[in-house]
Image (cartoon, rainbow, N blue to C red):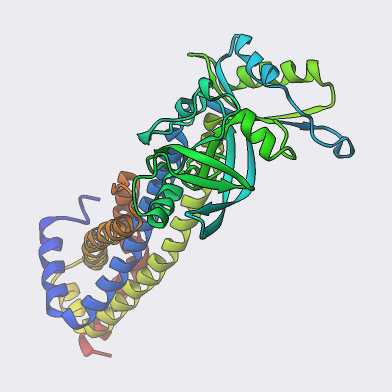
Amino acid sequence: MLRIFNRTHLAEAWSSLLSARHRTAPALIGIAIGVASVSSMISIGSIAKSEAARQFQELGTDIVNIRVRARNKGRGRIALKQGDAEGITALPGIRRAAPYTEAGAAAVYGGTETETVRIVGVTEDFASLARLEVAEGRFVSRLDGGRYFCAVGFEVANRLREAIGGNIVGAKIRLREAVFTVIGSLRRSDVGQRPFDPNGAVYLPIATAGRIAPEETLRDILAQTAAGTDYRTSTREVVAYFREREPGARVRVRSPEELIEQMHRQSRLYTLLLGAIGGISLLVGGIGVMNVMMMAVMERRQEIGVRRALGATRWDIQAQFLTEATILSLLGGLVGVVLGGCATWGICHFSGWTFELSSGGTVLGAVVASSAGIFFGFYPARRAAGLDPVTALQGA
């Protein structure tokens, strides 16, 4: 390698590339676009994976969603009792549990504004388990019992505020012909791995939700696993708990850790796919380098003949052209890494993602660029070294 990239070869290669700017520039641009595609796509794939993981982890990796259904669809839904749902806290792997119900309902604000919202019947522990933060007022508490109180999500609170034009705590909202008093509003929250959008929901005491939406039976639980408990262990405990009480139950436990593991496996495949797509651009750029070097060999036949006549070996000629191809590719790779970083930053800026460059993508882009220079420059260099000195001097 040192025999190829010695000081003399580097100086002559640089001089030759500068003297042929008209053909050097297009090849450099082709390599730059290819490297930019590879590095930016790998970085974007890595960032997308991190963002998805962050959203899942926002709810907490120790939080699991539990859904219990009948095994035989003909039997209908299994109606859990609140005591059964909260009884899983006796399991070694479960620390806290908050059962909840979901249903759709038409909401009327200020007597005129109507829309469909999610009504979620909850207990007091639901807010802390779901990482819901109160902006005004308070959340549903144990003391509310079956009263007609509700807390509203961020988007519902904004629409209610526009409809009544004032403070929403104490305002009235009609859900399924029942009138509720708003006792609090929530801050904006990422959807994350929650089974519903928390910003477009209205939260009611679970007993009240059972009265206004009797068709929705209790079958969902949000639970927190005990410290140091693997999600697989807690899953086995929960499944055994409910199947002991209802042999025909289908129990699905969704854990952020499980979802993150699945997501990482999928993300690796997506990153490889994105890198392969970017590699096509790099292949095109490499072919451009080969074409440029072939043109250089044709234009410099007499120069090659003179050098051979003065004692240059075939290896010297081959090393000279390989050096030119490698320098051209490395320059294109450097420009491509910068362009890839700028493209990644732009996508992150408009997507609201946290910007970070993938070191693997940057290194891979530089390595692949230099490799492409050697690979695609080898044939022109070999052809230049194989020219007959006499024929080359004649310019034929």
Q: Is residue 206 or residue 275 the one in the foreground?
A: 206
Residue 63: x and y, percent?
52, 26
- When asked about the image quadrant of residue 78, the answer is top right
Residue 73: x and y, percent?
85, 39
Q: Which residue appears at 10% of the width and 71% of the height? A: 15
Residue 221: x and y, percent?
62, 27
- When asked about the image quadrant of residue 85, the answer is top right
Q: Is residue 319 visible?
A: no
Q: Is residue 320 or residue 387 the one in the foreground?
A: 320
| Left or right of residue 23, residue 372 in this image | right
Q: Which residue appears at 42% of the width and 62% of the height? A: 278
Q: Which residue appears at 49% of the width and 24% of the height? A: 141
| Left or right of residue 337, residue 269 in this image | right
**Quadrant location of the C terminus in the rendered image:** bottom left
Q: Which residue appears at 41% of the width and 45% of the height? A: 154
| Looking at the image, residue 24 lies above or below residue 105 | below
